[in-house]
Image (tube, rainbow, N blue to C red):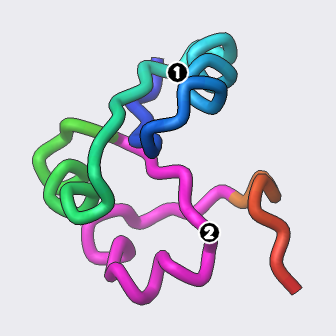
Amino acid sequence: GIKLRHHPDQLGVDVWTSLGLEVRVLGWTEVYESIQRGIVEAVNSPIALVEAMKFYEVAPNIVRHNEYPQG
């Protein structure tokens, strides 16, 4: 399955795992390097943080699933 970074939240981890993802619980400051090194392939993040964290430099695709609805 896809390797997803998730914050430490057991319910969230369980939900994504039940959908077939391999969940890695990592600190926020580890995300960029973890994508770059292939430790994770996906990040569950509010869209507003994608640009601020420069994820576009190491992850060329965005999929909106509206877990974090924003106006």
The residue segment tinted magenta is 41-63
The numbered mark at residue 21 is 1
Residue 9 placed where, x, y %? 53, 35
Q: Nearer the viewer, residue 6 or 33?
A: 6
- How many numbered marks have been drawn onto this rendered protein structure? 2
Element on which disc 1 rests:
loop
**Magenta stretch contains residue 54:** yes
Q: Is residue 14 left or right of residue 39?
A: right
Q: Which residue is mark 2?
A: 46
Image vertical order of residue 53 relative to residue 52, above or below: above
Residue 42 placed where, x, y %? 44, 45
Residue type indicated by callout 2 = Pro
Q: Could you tell me how far apart the alpha carbons at marks 1 and 2 are, in whole angstroms?
A: 19 Å
Residue 28, by quadrant, is bottom left
N-terminal of the pair, mark 1 or mark 2, is 1
Q: Is residue 71 left or right of residue 51?
A: right
Residue 69 placed where, x, y %? 84, 68
Residue type indicated by callout 1 = Leu
Element on which disc 2 rests:
loop
